[in-house]
Image: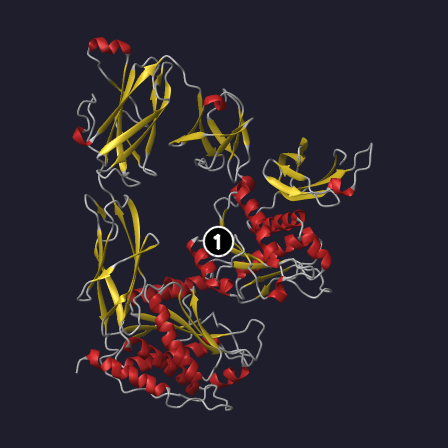
Amino acid sequence: MRTSRLIPLILSALVAAGCARPPKPGIDNLYRGLSENVPRLDPRLLAGRRIVVDPGHGGHFAGTRGAGGLEESSVNLGVSLYLWGLLEEAGADAYLTRSAQRDFLAGPDSAVSDDLKIRVARIDSIKPDIVVSIHHNAQPERDPSKNAVETYYKLGDPASRDLAFAVHRHLARNLGIEEGEVRPGNYYILREAAVPAILGEGSYLTHPRVEEKLRLSEKQRLEAEAYFLGILEYFSRGTPSADELTPAPGDSLVDEVPLVSYAVTDVGGIGLDPSGIEMTVNGGVVDAGLDPGGRTVSYRLPWDAPNGLYEVSLVVRNILGNSSRLLERAFVVAHPANRAVFSSFPETVPVEGGLVYFRVRLLDRRGLSIADRSRLKIAAWYRHPGNEARGGEWTTLAIARGEGAAETAVTDGVAEFPIDVPPGCAAVRIAVMPGGGPGVDASPEGAFGPAGFEYVVHATEGVSSFRSFVPLDRLTGAPVATVRFFDASGLVTADAHGDRLVVSGAGAAGELRIEAPGYRPVVSRPGESDTLHLDPWYGGALAGKRFVLNAEGAPPRALDRGPLGLAGSFVNLHVARFVEEYLSAAGARVRQARRTEETPTDRDVVLLTNRFRAGLYVEVRYRSGPADTALVVRTYCFPGSLRGLWVAGAVGNALGRALGVPALPPAGTVTFPLQQTACPAIIIEPPSLGRVDEELRLSEPWYQRKQAYAIFGGLLADAGVTNTAALHITLAKDSSAVAPPAGRSNWLVTVDDTWRLLTSPDGKAEFDWLPAGIHQFVLRRGETTVGPFEIVLQSGETRTLETSIPVAR
């Protein structure tokens, strides 16, 4: 009898066994015994299947402990050894990441990440079909009544999800635990394993009855049997897979519209489901087809598919419901250049010589730009007016760092390069050759052959008004790309040419203010050096660091409303936006998980955080509470996260100092984002909305900014910024008349055209985290401007200034 005919029989047996002995109501069924029988197995079902069982923790890492001292690592190992034996007896090739009470630390400075890396390396060397990581859970507050089965699968992988559901069903039924959930997970083992992987939390060791049961080897064997039944069910449904055919990863496709194709199969199953083909190309779903024989999935890109990088993902599902793992690949479409479009700036060669900027867009035979990162070889020549009498002889121009030809690359479909032209030229001639091209002789004729493209710019008597700049980071010397120019009338357009920015027209004649996120603004005047050395804020401590901010959406209504109806989700959004403003000004890269009233799912928040490769996840959470609740700052991190504990403490202390209220030590809590983000994660919970006075303050932008600036200060402290000073500004009433109290509030105070706060009702704006040095500040309200004022601050200094303002009318 063929294996494919046995599979429905095995599935039927599993279903029938699951109905054999339902738990009796009113009886303690916790680890009581198997509620289903192991069906008679086809010995070929697991034959050759490579399965890795990972006993979590071990050695130095004991995991959680029960109230009676039972260590999780020991229980994990006991269950795993039993499961390994069951799999081996069933014909599988089973492996353990550890078979003793040990860890994989390499030295005294090793951390849990080193242990996990060695486990993953072992898994990769085995090349298994699946990975099952065995764990047992704990409740952070150690609530003895909490118990559940939780099964995690690799985030975003359908095959892992199918395995998790199959295993979870049998764990829940046979362990006698009613509460439970299958969840996507981002634990290191799940994230880094290259195959379908799950992590099982069979029960909570902080539950006294669970600890009592799991001290017994027979109960550990019972749990292993439940895992075994789930694995058996998963493989009995077949495991579809896909292998790349064309194009191979990394290949460039030339002169053709690519056909993306995969060889597909359903190992141990009864065939693929034609409606279960899910392919995306650069994030968009496409209509890929399964051939009539069920052996190939293919999709042809449109004839006008642009040149460039293509990222393709594929999942196939079989008739019995199992999915393949998520298969991802990338390739480049690179049709060759067929014609070129040139431009220059200025449009004619200045008689006084100087830099001329050239731009070329190379198009393929379809009229589309060639692929980004394509290499071009460049050559240039010039001709003096006197040369025309000698037959128009051309002289080679130096390009970049050498004579003759140089190379550049295509970016956003365009290649740009400057040429330094000597005075008195009659014309400049350039040639480009895609793909590097051959060497260049002394004259342009035939230098690049028929595949090259040429362009000639002639001289003019007029002189173009323009200034070029090379913005550089003063500390690193790296180019700064995100620069903006302003003259007295506003933003000035700057044209990018390689590492230079060119400002032309009227804006080039006067004083220019230059800004870039993460840098102090500077002023440039005509005649000054074209090299701009920009000073990074805080020595670049936050430059390039990645943050995800999550303004908590609407929790249950009772938690989210103040007595007067102010919604915490509303305040969260505003404060998170102000935190983003300060972080971005310091050079950090920020993504907001929520920008509107719509609340993203926890899964989407984790996916965003991981895809963004964030270094820190920060959740802002304003909650309500009883009216007599004391005003305190609370912060949270995932239990055991030392990095999260440190960051949460730094932010909590900074916010508490700014508000003049206590900051409680960071508490451990388990939420899906804190648990599953690949980076450290914290929750910030400022004082409660439950008090009317606090609710009224939180409805005001000045107070929202004050809190956001304090959160920013805590993140600076976490980044190691210590040489800061404080500037406290108080607005005085005019000496000749008494201004009403409203005249001192909501003045926008701006320091160094970067850092902004609003004055409070008593006329105060406190900048507690300014770098030491010279600063300028101005005050604005409506059409009225006061300042600028200049002040020098020393590190560690707190300077308090009282500033006169006009009488409010």
Q: Please tell me which residue lies in front, 169 or 534.
A: 169
On screen, residue 26 versus residue 173, left or right, reads right
- Count residues near mark 1 (Cα–Cα under 10 Å), then give few for <14, some for 14-19, many for 20+: some
Q: Which image quarter is the N terminus in?
A: bottom left
- Tell me which corner region of the image, top left, top right, bottom left or bottom right, holds residue 158: bottom left
How many marks do you count on the picture? 1
Residue 89: x and y, percent?
28, 83
Is label 1 in a helix, a strand or a loop?
Answer: loop
Name the residue rendered at 24%, 74% in the picture: 269
On screen, residue 675 versus residue 277, left or right, reads right
Name the residue rendered at 31%, 14% in the picture: 425
Residue 404: x and y, percent?
26, 25
Asked if 582 appears above or below 782 in the picture, the reply is below
- Tell me which corner region of the image, top left, top right, bottom left or bottom right, holds residue 79: bottom left
Q: Please tell me which residue lies in front, 22 or 232.
A: 22
Name the residue rendered at 23%, 35% in the picture: 434
Residue labelled with disc 1: 615
Residue 627: x and y, percent?
72, 64
Three-letter residue code for mark 1? Gly
Q: Please tell me which residue lies in front, 356 or 604.
A: 604
Question: In this view of the protein, can residue 725 be seen by the observer?
Answer: no
- Tell me which corner region of the image, top left, top right, bottom left or bottom right, holds residue 586: top right
Q: Please tell me which residue lies in front, 97 or 752.
A: 752
Residue 684: x and y, percent?
59, 58
Asked if 323 appears above or below 429 in the picture, the reply is below
Q: How is the image coloured?
A: secondary structure
Asked if 737 appears above or below 712 in the picture, the reply is above
Q: Which image quarter is the C terminus in?
A: top right
Question: In this view of the protein, can residue 473 be seen by the observer?
Answer: yes
